[in-house]
Amino acid sequence: MEHFGVIDLGSNSARLTVTEISDDGTTKKIIEEKEPVRLSENMGPEKELKQPAMERTLTTLENFRKLYKDLPKLNLRAVATAATRMAANQKEFLKLVKKEADIDLEVITGAMEAHYDYLGVINSLPVVNAVLMDTGGASTELILVQNRRAVNLISLPLGSVNLSERYLEKDLVSASSLFQLFTAMENLYNDIWWLDRGKNLPIVALGGSNRTLAKIQRRRDNFKRYWDIHGFRMSGAQVNDIFDEVVSKDLAARKDIPGLSKERGDIIIGGLSPAVLLQRHLDSDRMIFSQQGLRDGILYEHLSDLENQGKFS
């Protein structure tokens, strides 16, 4: 038996999962934590992690460590994504994380992030042909899946936090600002040559902003476990209707939308825009939501390695 922990340090949130792996290969999640650290906040054109964001993140990582440090046979994998990946002061930050939280933080590429997203989805949902989309705080990963294989993938350096900071007002968003954001995303999509091969396919959506769509819809439909969105489906019309509601409200009103967490209210329009535009670009009429992504993909890879080594009885 071993404990396998994964820390996913994203641009908006830090997440920890610890899974108990039995000798026969069965698994049980024993710790699952999430904190909104906003690591990419105010990085600006100089692409530098700012002191308040680093301090919030270090506090969270230190708290994570307290949760798992006494577990026996712990194997920990800690990965950092877009914000750390693009940071000019990346080396200083990694040294600080090691010194203050005793965590060896591994900065993974956008392609590797997309690969782990794919592993998380393909091992937990009956997806055959689809476009997977993970919208984070400072990046968006797209993966074209055909016959359950990832045939193309890309990581775009735009997500909920940096899109919001670059294009949108914090309170009521103007039509001009939204138009500029949409134009920028459309230009990006037009430059991805293989994306047209995903025409009419469903979008499998990951990431906190995209999952918020499902939570809002499930609150509208009076689901008791509205947060349990794995495998939940929405029509294109439902997605557009929720985006219309979100865009029409000021910040205070957005924070009061059932299913939308208050700390995400200021970045939700920027966070949903890539998915809404991708749906339009692909002429896709349905969206499927996955709660399994990067951390689960890393776990599935680890389980496969253990099985190949003959570790399971």
Image (cartoon, rainbow, N blue to C red):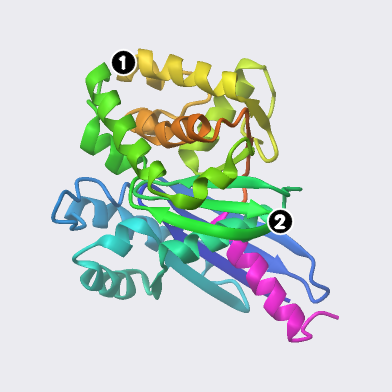
- Main secondary structure type of the part rendered in magenta: helix
Give the residue pinned by disc 2: 148
Q: Is residue 139 left or right of residue 53?
A: right
Q: Is residue 110 left or right of residue 46?
A: right
Question: In the image as oriented, which residue stretches furthest toward the right?
Answer: 313
The residue located at (37%, 74%) in the rendering is 102
Q: Does residue 289 show up magenta in the picture?
A: no
Give the residue pinned by disc 1: 250
Is disc 2 placed on a helix, strand or loop?
Answer: loop
User: Which quadrant is home to the N terminus?
Assistant: bottom right
The kind of residue on which mark 1 rests is: Asp
Marks 1 and 2, how far apart at CA: 41 Å
Above or below for 248 versus 27: above
Is disc 1 placed on a helix, strand or loop?
Answer: loop
Q: Nearer the viewer, residue 112 or 66?
A: 112
Expressed as whole percent of the image width and height from the top left, the position of residue 268 reads: 39, 30
Q: Does residue 299 show up magenta in the picture?
A: yes
The kind of residue on which mark 2 rests is: Arg
Q: Is residue 61 left or right of residue 196?
A: left
Judge whether residue 103 can be spotted in this image.
Answer: no
Q: How many marks?
A: 2
Q: Which residues are magenta?
A: 293-313
| Residue 91, quarter of the rendered image | bottom left
Of mark 1 and mark 2, the one earlier in the sequence is 2
